[in-house]
Image (tube, rainbow, N blue to C red):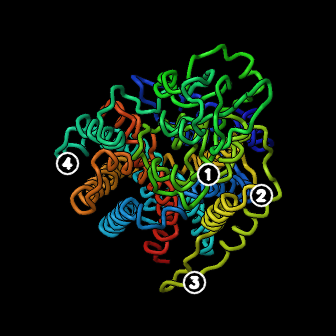
Amino acid sequence: MSTVQWMISTAPEIFLLLAIAIGTILGRLKVRGFSIGTTACILIVAVLIGQLGSFSFPPVLRGILFSLFVFTIGYRSGPEFFASLSIRTLAQVVLSLVIGATGLVLVLIFAHLFKLDTGTAAGLTAGALTQSSVIGTASGALAQLGLAPEVLKQQEANIAAGYAVTYVLGYILTLLFVPFVAPRLMRVDLKAEAKKLEAELAGGIPAKTDNLSYRKFQARAYRVSAAAGRTVEAIEAGIGGRTVVERIVRRGADIGPHRDVVLENGDDIVLTGPTAAIVAAKTVIGAEIDPDQLLRNLPGNVIDVLVESRKLHGHSIRDVAEIVGDNARGVFLRALTRMGREVPLGPDTRVYVGDVMTLVGSTANIARATPQVGSALNTSDRTDIAFLAAGIAVGLLAGLASFKVGGVALTLGGGGGALIAGLVCGWLRSRKPTMGAMPPAAQQTLSDIGLGGFIAAIGLGNGLAAWSAIQAHGVLLVGMGVVVTLVPLTVGTIVAFYVLRMNPVVTCGALAGAMTVDAAVTGACDVAESKTPVLGVAVPYAVGNVVLTVLGPIVVAATYSG
């Protein structure tokens, strides 16, 4: 053991990285399709390793790690959060607030009834409401109270203990509640309701498949005979399906395919659009010809575009096409992705800021349409480190501000300040895509390293005390955790369905988003045999990340008695 103790005192960072590595591996393991998740596993592993001795990490390390995590969460959620402040998404915002407020009230009731210390109450909040960032904001608020080092260390250990006991259970209960319990409370058949919603999205026509995505986009070549004497605009309108004449070759020379151009007998044209529309174009235009030569010089493109235009937020795809107008000519939507999950497509499917549209069409048409929607996702983009560092610095500075509630100084702390800074920076990036680049892969890396490192440092540094707290209050925490998880979900379901009149399928997705357990959407999709529950996730997830995170300092202020 002397060697181990020497390593602990000389290079504790070795054990921090080991805790991250082992916890991440364990968090990926699935038993019958279920996994605990990396965050809980990292904390559990860190607490167990913490039994080997006394670990010490400088507060600045934990502060930087947590700031990276919450800033990234804010940056990712910023466009959706600010765009959600509109009448179209008001119901989903209210649902997130109801769940957060109900959870807070329950925690404060339990803290009063069972005389819970501030750290335990904060840990209960973080775990039962499945929001790991509460650990950081609560710890930051405690650090502002001027507590003695040993008292602060015990409070942090109690946060870790409360979180470790309640998070796994809260996560599992949320995964089960969303697809199975919520539909029963609403007295609906989720599968039948999903089919109805799919039909609505398809404009009243039931979908023939589980995926409502538009039919395949194609380009074909024709030689004009029947269409001679008609304008391009008339041909496009006659064929329908948003088909577009992309190219006209007349006696070996290219003619600009403007809408007022009159086609002549013998012209060769390229027609693009959905398969079902253009295969029937032969009778309107003329014989189909070998397209190789015509298509060789017609560059096509498939590109992912991040939706950043506020004017599109909450509108249906049908409306989006009208808003974009002529700039959408020749551009087709092949897929819509929300939080990494494909959304079922139909004319009435709504689009939100933060969604990713996969557009297909000629390079020129794509280039014309993209700025009207947002910005193209370029995986080769580098992170704007200056923007990132400056944003976090401003957030940490803002976190130093405080005001007194009674005898307690209420403050967001560094974590809360970094979250707000992330929200603003993410919004600024959506307004001006040339600044503050942070590709999705970089966002995920910073988030994983930041949260994993912070959680590991908390577990290692407070392992001995946390284990004692778990042994002393484990059973009580389990009981309270069940209540703090299930009651907000139950209240949220009732309010969403019976008061706000939200669609039951969308409600299931919104519940998962408000609890920031987006994995619960997968269960709802499986039960519904449809991807429609994804439609309700984005806005509640963005709002929930903010609402639940700021509960940390609120719980500290409400439960600390000096």
- Closer to the chain start, of discs 1 and 3, is 1
Q: Is residue 124 visible?
A: yes
Calculate the distance from the C-alpha at mark 1 to the C-alpha at mark 3.
41 Å
Q: Position of residue 535 (x, y in %)?
A: 41, 46
Q: Residues within 10 Å of mark 2 (few under 14, many from 20)?
A: some
Relative vertical location of residue 368 with respect to residue 247 in this rendering, above or below: below
Report the residue at 29% width, 67% height from top: 113
Label 4, on which residue?
Answer: 185
Query: Tags 2 and 1 in contact by the CB under 8 Å rule?
Result: no
Under mark 2, the amino acid is Met
Residue placed furthest toward the left: 187
Q: Specify the quadrant of the image occupied by residue 171.
A: top left
Query: Tags 3 and 2 in contact by the CB under 8 Å rule?
Result: no
- Closer to the chain start, of discs 4 and 1, is 4
Query: Tags 4 and 1 in contact by the CB under 8 Å rule?
Result: no
Q: Is residue 166 visible?
A: no
Q: Position of residue 61 (x, y in %)?
A: 74, 54
Q: Position of residue 357 (x, y in %)?
A: 57, 42
Tell me: 561 left or right of 359. left
Task: Tell us which disc is closer to us: 3 or 4.
Answer: 4
Calculate the distance from the C-alpha at mark 3 to the C-alpha at mark 4.
42 Å
Relative vertical location of residue 27 with respect to residue 395 in this rendering, above or below: above
Label 1, on which residue?
Answer: 373
Under mark 4, the amino acid is Leu
Calculate the distance from the C-alpha at mark 3 to the C-alpha at mark 2.
33 Å
Label 3, on which residue?
Answer: 403
Identify the disc placed on residue 435: 2
Calculate the distance from the C-alpha at mark 4 to the C-alpha at mark 1.
38 Å
